[in-house]
Amino acid sequence: MDFSSKYLEKAVEEIGGLPGIGKKTALRLALFLLRSETQVAAKLASSIVDLHDKVKRCKSCGNLSDFEQCHICTNPTRDKSIVCVVEDIRDVMAIENTGQYKGIYHVLGGLVSPMDGVGPSDLNIASLVEKAASEKINEVILALSANMEGETTSFYIFKKLKAFNLPLSAIARGIAVGDQLEYADELTLARSLKNRLPYETSIHQNRS
Amino acid sequence: MDFSSKYLEKAVEEIGGLPGIGKKTALRLALFLLRSETQVAAKLASSIVDLHDKVKRCKSCGNLSDFEQCHICTNPTRDKSIVCVVEDIRDVMAIENTGQYKGIYHVLGGLVSPMDGVGPSDLNIASLVEKAASEKINEVILALSANMEGETTSFYIFKKLKAFNLPLSAIARGIAVGDQLEYADELTLARSLKNRLPYETSIHQNRS
């Protein structure tokens, strides 16, 4: 593309550097910002700078927060003895949206992935082991993705925490609510058969 | 969504305010910026602010430029007597990419669209009439989109410029190069039949 303004070219380059945004979309967004009022661009720019200046990681769980500790860790009604291990803060949001979980979280900040060069030492695992060693925890729930990286990370954490003799569980894998059986893959179907529940438990859950 | 940081929430809101970017994409982009180095976010933010501070509209054609006049209007090799009227600076880029046009441009900054509340007075049309009145122009080419808004705008400009007795042309409508005839719509096909060219002209163009 042949730009008539080098500032426009720079903006398109920077916006196009974001994941999933191509050159054409970047140009469309830059022209939108140019057309809109100065305030719109200024507010967007300052909110992006604030992300780095103001947002911290909660020192106890790794969740994003504006303070030293996040609103979940400082909430007195949450059960601090149950820790749910998740990959990302988006998973915290997803679980919070269910309204079913009253414990606290531990955000790893990624999954072990040799393909992407991410090892256990790159993740927030050491502090989880410390937490487990402190004997304030009664249960650890592994809520990681059902893919290769998720399973590898779960197994690594399982090995690290085995010595503490804590109840360690993983979230259930199975047919998603609303899904048709015939479209489920063999692995999921096999797992959901193996981990079947007494029917009475199952209907009780559907009603709650 | 339930955000653990109000700065993150603000960034997601601002990014999600851009056209074609939903809340989920905005969150993904905000988290990407958070994870990347401070410099990435700072450069993006400053390039967005620069858009408003540094990019000007060329005072003679309305194209975007870093200076009072754009690089096309100040180029001594361009033919200033031929003016191509386009909607947007993206159209200037598209025509420049063909490498076939040696005249100058006139960017309207939009099309007449009563549905969106855009009238002729909202567009850069008055200065086009002034240009035509100055008698420095020998030809005006209308290169607007082949839709209702484009046709309306072309007709409005035609009526405004009629008094000056200038050669006024519109770019050809027809079957796109590479397209199959059977998939063309009736209007396009009818127009391309009506505006047929002598075969020798047509093969000469295909070869150039």
Image: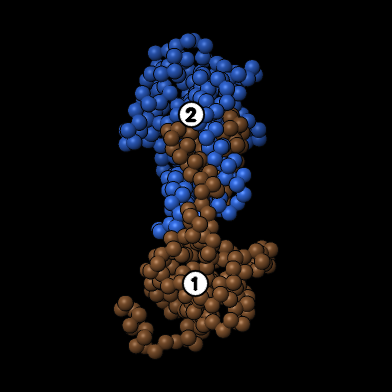
Chain colours: A brown, B blue
x 53%, y 57%: residue: A57
Q: Nearer the viewer, residue A165 or B116?
A: A165
Identify the element where label 2 is drawn: strand
In the rendered structure, the answer to whether residue B122 lies left or right of residue B74 reads left
Q: Where residue B189 appears, x then y in whole percent?
A: 45, 41
Image height of B205 relative to B180, above or below: above
x 57%, y 66%: residue: A108
Q: Nearer the viewer, residue A142 or A82?
A: A82
Numbered mark located on residue A84 in the image: 1
Residue holding disc 2: B86
x 37%, y 26%: residue: B122
Q: Where residue A4 appears, x then y in whole percent?
A: 59, 29
**Chain designation of label 2:** B
Mark 1 burial class by Cα count in 10 Å: few <14, some 14-19, many 20+? many
* Tags 1 and 2 touching, CB below 8 Å: no
Image height of B14 relative to A67, above or below: above
Q: Quadrant of the N terminus of chain A?
A: top right
Identify the element where label 1 is drawn: strand
Question: Total label count?
Answer: 2
Numbered mark located on residue A22 in the image: none
Image height of B80 relative to A194, above or below: above
Same subunit, labels 1 and 2: the answer reads: no
Q: Quadrant of the C terminus of chain A?
A: bottom left
- Judged by depth in the image, the label closer to the viewer, 1 or 2, is 1
Mark 2 burial class by Cα count in 10 Å: few <14, some 14-19, many 20+? many
Amino acid of disc 1: Cys
Image height of B79 relative to A178, above or below: above
Amino acid of disc 2: Val
Q: Nearer the viewer, residue B60 or B169?
A: B60
Q: Where residue B146 appears, x then y in whole percent?
A: 44, 36
x 40%, y 67%: residue: A76
